[in-house]
Amino acid sequence: MEHYDVKFKKKFGQNFLKRKAVVERIADCCPLSVNDLVIEVGPGGAILTQELAKRVGKVLAYEIDEDLKLELEKKLSDYSNVTVLYQDFLVSDIKKDIIEYHYQNLYFISNVPYYITTPIMMKIMESGLDFKKICMMVQKEVGDRFSALPGTRDYSSISVFLSYFYVIKKEFFVSRKEFVPEPNVDSVVVSFTRRDKVAELKNRELFFRLVRDSFQFKRKNIRNNLKKYNLDIVSQVLGDYGYDLTVRAEQLSVEIFVALANALA
């Protein structure tokens, strides 16, 4: 059982894993090699960082809490292949940070701070970096939303964005009892594998905006949520798929959103 000599900060969502068996399972989700680079956010007490460092050539970790510096330096003293940047990942220039790294495959593996899970995922998607695979531990309810299918309660704009880019898989459940301090929620490890073939978009920015607007008011239909768009075009595309303007966004697949965005571009 891992011991941490730190003062946990609720504002940073600090809940550290206790058992190495769990971090080994997380690392097993990706086919890591010594030629690869892994990005991690929120290394905390470094239990996952240590496991990653044993398997890959380089680990780049982002830690916002500088008070963890002594703990991390102590836990990572035997790992020369780990670099910790004490800065906010959400405002970091990832491309610039890794420009001097040489690697075969790029991975993102992390027990992410739950209060910024979705912003982290959006930043990864919008970074333009070619992550071979992403594997992260998230709050169970967030994992449900990330992997939700059309027509289900949890299906949302983030579900659409993620399934456009990735094949999503729930890897395994993690009980709240595996953490210190123990959080009020259970967790799930979710992996995202980049699709070999992604549907072509005429205007990616329009696609993201259209999807967000479609889900803006979840109880309203497409006619009400997309008032500022050309509804004649929207209606025509929906008709091709057997729907009309009274449909709600949660009924529409990624394929339909791509068709809508391309017709409106």
Image (cartoon, rainbow, N blue to C red):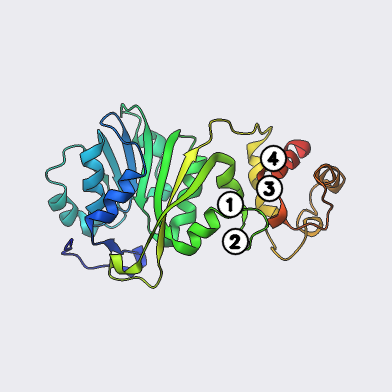
The spot of residue 12 in percent (x, y) is 35, 63
Which residue lies under the disc numbered 4? 258
Looking at numbered disc 2 in the image, what kind of residue is underneath it? Asp
Which label sits on residue 154? 2
Q: Of tags 4 and 2, which is closer to the observer?
A: 2
Relative to residue 122, is residue 114 drawn left or right? left
Element on which disc 3 rests: loop
Between marks 4 and 3, how big is the CA–CA gap? 9 Å
Looking at numbered disc 3 in the image, what kind of residue is underneath it? Ser
Which residue lies under the disc numbered 1? 159
Which label sits on residue 253? 3
The spot of residue 218 in percent (x, y) is 69, 63
Residue at 43%, 36% (x, y): give it. Answer: 131
Residue at 72%, 43% (x, y): give it. Answer: 256
| First-in-chain label (1 vs 2) | 2
Between marks 3 and 2, how big is the CA–CA gap? 14 Å
| First-in-chain label (1 vs 4) | 1
